[in-house]
Image (cartoon, helix red, strand yellow):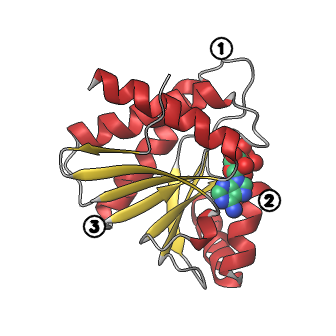
Amino acid sequence: MGEVAEIIIGKVNLGLLEGDITRQATEAIVNAANSSLMGGGGVDGAIHRAGGPAILEECRQIVSRIGRLDAGKAVITTGGNLPAKHVIHTVGPVWRGGGRGEAELLASAYRECLQLASDYKLKSLSFPSISTGVYSYPVAEAAKVALSTVIAFLRDVPTSLKEVFFVLYDSGTYRAYSAMLAESAGQM
Ligand code: ADP
């Protein structure tokens, strides 16, 4: 099976990068947060470390307004000291074997981020691989849900976005996404 690093959907570029999402200069980056919005390990910890306390302060205000953030939902804050102006915080599902609505919750997390970015008229957005770290979602299955959901949104929903990236932290995750993107591109 081949690997693909970029496709074009309508007028939107969808690209895959291997690297650290906190360094990405897209207008927003997505955080794979947990429901408390109070920071954590993995990409969440990296974003709060690199972005500084302004992000956590806004998360606190959001939690005082709406309470915990359910899986599949998303909210937006400042990017603080990050190159990205905004962080979109979403909560992916914890993998419990696949029979507990995980795929639908993961798809919802991606869609809510894309919709928020569109509502804010953003032109560029970067995603990490939501749920495949501490939340243990199998990476090939997560890649399939992530890419098919993003491709369907960009194809079907009017959006300000021009560029969407997946920034994948390790080469195994990158390869899983690029193999899946090759498959998705073949079906378009
Ligand atoms: P979750 O709790 O949703 O599983 P994690 O942060 O544990 O979230 O992991 C999600 C993915 O993010 C994993 O593939 C992990 O390797 C990756 N990751 C960790 N740090 C970074 C980073 N700085 N940039 C991009 N991806 C990262």
Label 3 and label 2: CA atoms lie apart by 29 Å
User: Between 61 and 137, which is closer to the camera in this rendering?
Assistant: 137
> Mark 1: which secondary structure?
loop
Classify mark 2 as within 8 Å of ligand 1 or not, answering yes or no: yes
> Is the residue marked by circle 3 packed among few (<14), some (14-19), or many (20+) residues within 10 Å?
few
Q: Which residue is mark 3?
A: 121
Identify the amino acid type marked 1.
Answer: Gly
Q: Are marks 2 and 1 in contact (CB under 8 Å)?
A: no
Label 2 and label 1: CA atoms lie apart by 26 Å
Q: Where is residue 146 shown, x and y percent of the image? A: 49, 36
Using residue 95 as the reference point, say whether residue 166 is left or right of it: left
> Mark 3: which secondary structure?
loop
User: Between 36 and 94, which is closer to the camera in this rendering?
Assistant: 94
User: Which badge, 2 or 1, comes first in the chain's sequence?
Assistant: 2
Q: Does the rendering let one see residue 45?
A: yes
Choose top left, top right, bottom left or bottom right for residue 140.
Answer: top right
User: Which badge, 3 or 1, comes first in the chain's sequence?
Assistant: 1
Q: Where is residue 137 shown, x and y percent of the image? A: 69, 31
Identify the amino acid type marked 2.
Answer: Gly
Label 3 and label 1: CA atoms lie apart by 35 Å
> Mark 2: which secondary structure?
loop
Q: Which mark is residue 40?
A: 2
Where does the C terminus fall, quadrant-wise?
A: top left
Choose top left, top right, bottom left or bottom right for residue 130.
Answer: top right
Q: Which mark is residue 99?
A: 1
